[in-house]
Image: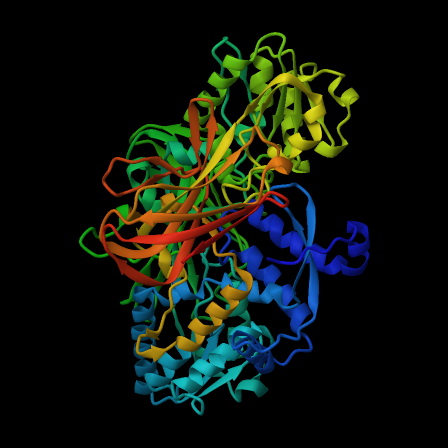
């Protein structure tokens, strides 16, 4: 466990302000941004941190120091103080980490491994590079290849193998550049491939000798242009490439499709909550007229296939020509008249893109969703390139056969779409909802089953004499309690942004005389803040904006320690307990994001595997958050309880817990992961953040609005029915930390 430094926040900040700011930016991105891995914002922030940390460090020596560290050699790097908001206790902890923590984390979470497991991608790049080399050779040209953002060096090795005469690769991320150099050497290309550890925009003709005529790149993200492809291509064509060069890929075609989907609609705007006493928690109209741009919703759309109704045919809205000079405008807009193939409500647009890999357009790499593919062909799984969902300003009702217009826009990095004309600059959230909550949290606040559970609980425990305290971030519970006629409702919200948003909802619903917002931390609340009233009911969802894992929403429990003198003698505390559960699983694909690559298209990438493992071991917790409903799996065991907390006992009266639990395999399979989640008990009701349905078919159904914890095995192993694995679980009530170790 990281050592906690007991110094005042102001003292630390005065000395380590830069580290605090960098860390907080990354933390905020993780809390709001949905997908963490390979997001544009996190990578750009990571680049800033890398530059700052590595300005005077020799890359090769640095990489070697981590190899030495794994052999037991003492690591002499200077420690760095890092601010960490403890999502359980709500306090700021200062921990000591390796001074190179930022870029180690960037390597561990880069997503390169996922791409290297994409056989469809790799084969099509290899084939297209071969065709491009052949075309240039047929023109009696010396083939001079430039690979921008080489990563592991894979594409450059493909070019060299296919006969390119001169191969140059550039990679700005220093640890990856060092790794690529080793991969290139291991595969025998040391004298064939020149690696330049620079951004392509910093590469000069002196670096590469002369202009190249084969441009090989993979600069794409889910949005295609989100990682700066437009700027990188434009610069390369202007300074480094011949006018008649060949690019692999040659072009990108972008498509959108109007759809209706109740689940996606629920993730875009808050709906009115009807209550059984003929009242309601209503929402401002502004929430229904905001598209939430620029926060795209990236997810595995194929897993929603049964819930999606296409309302239009796919429409090609943009073409990005990667092979010509000055062919990529930074700003572009198109409009297309389309005919509705079904009647319905335009809730969202699904966007994807295809790559024409070769100049002849014969090799197509497609990211289309499953319903727009040839059903007879296997569908490649990708987590690095998913479909993206965008939302219109207004949900428009259409009839089958209606004609309507799709408006499409992009700037250098972002995309937006609508059914009505909109501004040519990237729109921003105008209602506050989308910059406050993740898409998952918006959907969770709308979930009918969950809200019904809370309404029934409040009805059961609230009378006109009840004084209620709600402790959760960005919750509708205080408004529900007030509408159900509690005498007084006090609301404790630890997050400034969510508290501000709920304050606006309270004002909109004219409940300011019923609800008191406690703009303080729990330890600072005095009897007069509660109007000298005693609390009869404490309820939490629980939800903490800063929590990443389902058992981290425990701030309400720690807050009660400071509030115990303000509670009535017969206070009801909900939830009353939490159980952490685990299940052995066989993922169809998710394990690939951590699985070693080994040999890729005939090239030995094991040096990269080693780098990822070292970085993961240095920076990652063993458990990471993932929305498991997006990743099909089969259960290899029954759900097993591995930890229990009783919230009717205060944390200071809870001993440090240690459990040794056996998880019994219920069937044969390949074990490549463990799923973990929390279940909160509200009297007779249980709210699960994980498994919500078990039909004994071995196919688990997961809560779509929570992220579960997952332990992914670097190396999968075959298991037999009635064998077991042992898990050691510890819980430290002092800081709320759970630790999970599989033996």
Left or right of 7: which side holds 172? left
**Which is nearer the eye, 290 or 741?**
741
Image quadrant holding the C terminus, namely: bottom left
Left or right of 322: which side holds 340? left
Residue 125 visible at all: yes
Furthest-bottom residue in this view: 191
Image quadrant holding the N terminus, namely: bottom right
Whole-percent x, y for residue 219 in the image: 47, 66
Left or right of 123: which side holds 115? right
**Which is nearer the eye, 417 or 697?**
697
Whole-percent x, y for residue 301 in the image: 36, 45
Whole-percent x, y for residue 22 in the image: 67, 57
Whole-percent x, y for residue 419 in the image: 45, 37
Q: From what the image shows, is residue 140 above or below residue 153?
A: below
Residue at position x 58%, y 17% in the image: 481
Q: From what the image shows, is residue 716 above or below residue 271?
A: below
**Which is nearer the eye, 379 or 590?**
590
Residue 412 visible at all: no
Residue at position x 37%, y 88% in the image: 141
- For the rendered model, the colour scheme is rainbow
Left or right of 290: which side holds 155? left
Q: From what the image shows, is residue 134 above or below residue 49?
A: below
């Amino acid at each position: 466990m990281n050592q906690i430094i007991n110094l005042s926040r102001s003292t630390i900040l005065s000395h380590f302000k830069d580290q605090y700011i960098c860390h907080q930016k990354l933390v905020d991105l993780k809390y709001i941004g949905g997908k963490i891995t390979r997001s544009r914002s996190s990578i750009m922030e990571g680049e800033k941190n890398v530059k700052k940390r590595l300005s005077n460090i020799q890359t090769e020596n640095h990489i070697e120091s981590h190899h030495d560290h794994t052999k037991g050699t003492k690591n002499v790097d200077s420690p760095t103080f890092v601010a960490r908001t403890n999502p359980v206790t709500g306090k700021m902890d200062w921990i000591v980490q390796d001074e190179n923590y930022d870029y180690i984390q960037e390597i561990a979470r880069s997503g390169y491994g996922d791409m290297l497991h994409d056989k469809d991608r790799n084969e099509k790049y290899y084939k297209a590079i071969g065709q491009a080399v052949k075309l240039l050779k047929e023109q009696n040209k010396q083939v001079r290849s430039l690979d921008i953002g080489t990563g592991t060096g894979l594409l450059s090795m493909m070019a060299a193998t296919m006969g390119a005469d001169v191969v140059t690769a550039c990679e700005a991320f220093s640890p990856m550049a060092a790794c690529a150099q080793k991969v290139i050497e291991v595969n025998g290309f040391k004298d064939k491939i020149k690696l330049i550890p620079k951004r392509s925009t910093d590469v000069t003709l002196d670096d590469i000798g002369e202009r190249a005529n084969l441009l090989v790149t993979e600069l794409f993200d889910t949005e295609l242009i989100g990682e700066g492809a437009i700027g990188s291509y434009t610069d390369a064509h202007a300074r480094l490439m011949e006018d008649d060069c060949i690019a692999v890929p040659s072009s990108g075609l972008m498509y959108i499709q109007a759809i209706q989907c109740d689940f996606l609609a629920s993730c875009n705007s808050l709906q009115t909550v009807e209550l059984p006493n003929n009242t309601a928690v209503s929402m401002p109209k502004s929430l229904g007229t905001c598209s939430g741009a620029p926060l795209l919703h990236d997810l595995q759309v194929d897993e929603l296939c049964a819930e999606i109704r296409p309302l239009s045919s796919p429409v090609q809205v943009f073409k990005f020509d990667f092979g010509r000079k000055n062919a990529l405008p930074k700003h572009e807009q198109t409009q297309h008249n389309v005919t509705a193939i079904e009647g319905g409500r335009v809730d969202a647009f699904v966007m994807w893109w295809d790559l024409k890999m070769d100049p002849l357009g014969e090799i197509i790499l497609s990211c289309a969703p499953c319903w727009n593919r040839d059903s007879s062909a296997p569908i490649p799984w990708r987590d690095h390139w998913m479909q993206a969902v965008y939302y219109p300003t207004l949900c428009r009702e259409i009839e089958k056969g209606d004609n309507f217009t799709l408006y499409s826009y992009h700037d250098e990095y972002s995309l937006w779409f609508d059914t009505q004309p909109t501004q040519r600059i990237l729109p921003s959230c105008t209602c506050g909802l989308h910059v406050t909550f993740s898409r998952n949290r918006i959907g969770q606040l709308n979930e009918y089953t969950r809200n019904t559970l809370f309404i029934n609980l409040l009805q059961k425990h609230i009378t006109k004499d009840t004084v209620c305290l709600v402790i959760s971030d960005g919750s509708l519970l205080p408004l529900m309690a007030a509408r159900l006629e509690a005498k007084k409702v006090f609301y404790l919200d630890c997050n400034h942004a969510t508290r501000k948003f709920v304050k606006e909802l309270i004002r909109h619903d004219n409940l300011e005389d019923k609800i008191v917002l406690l703009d303080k931390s729990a330890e600072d609340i005095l009897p007069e803040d509660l109007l000298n009233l005693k609390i009869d009911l404490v309820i939490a969802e629980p939800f903490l904006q800063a929590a990443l894992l389902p058992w981290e929403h425990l701030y309400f429990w720690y807050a009660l320690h400071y509030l115990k003198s303000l509670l009535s003698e017969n206070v009801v505390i909900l939830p009353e307990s939490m159980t952490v559960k685990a299940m052995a699983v066989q993922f169809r694909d998710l394990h690939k994001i951590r699985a070693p690559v080994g040999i890729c298209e005939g090239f030995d990438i094991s040096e990269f595997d080693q780098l990822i493992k070292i970085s993961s071991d240095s920076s990652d917790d063993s458990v990471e958050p993932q929305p498991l409903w997006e990743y099909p799996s089969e259960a290899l065991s029954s759900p097993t309880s591995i930890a229990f907390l009783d919230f009717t006992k205060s944390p200071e009266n809870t001993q440090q817990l240690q459990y040794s639990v056996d998880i019994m395999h219920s069937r044969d399979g390949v074990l490549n992961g463990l799923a973990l989640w929390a279940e909160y008990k509200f009297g007779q009701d249980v709210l699960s953040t994980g498994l919500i349905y078990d039909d004994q078919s071995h196919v688990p159904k997961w809560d779509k609005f929570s992220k579960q914890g997952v332990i992914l095995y670097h190396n999968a192993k075959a298991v037999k029915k009635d064998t077991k694995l042992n898990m050691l679980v510890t819980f430290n009530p002092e800081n709320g930390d759970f630790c999970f170790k599989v033996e």
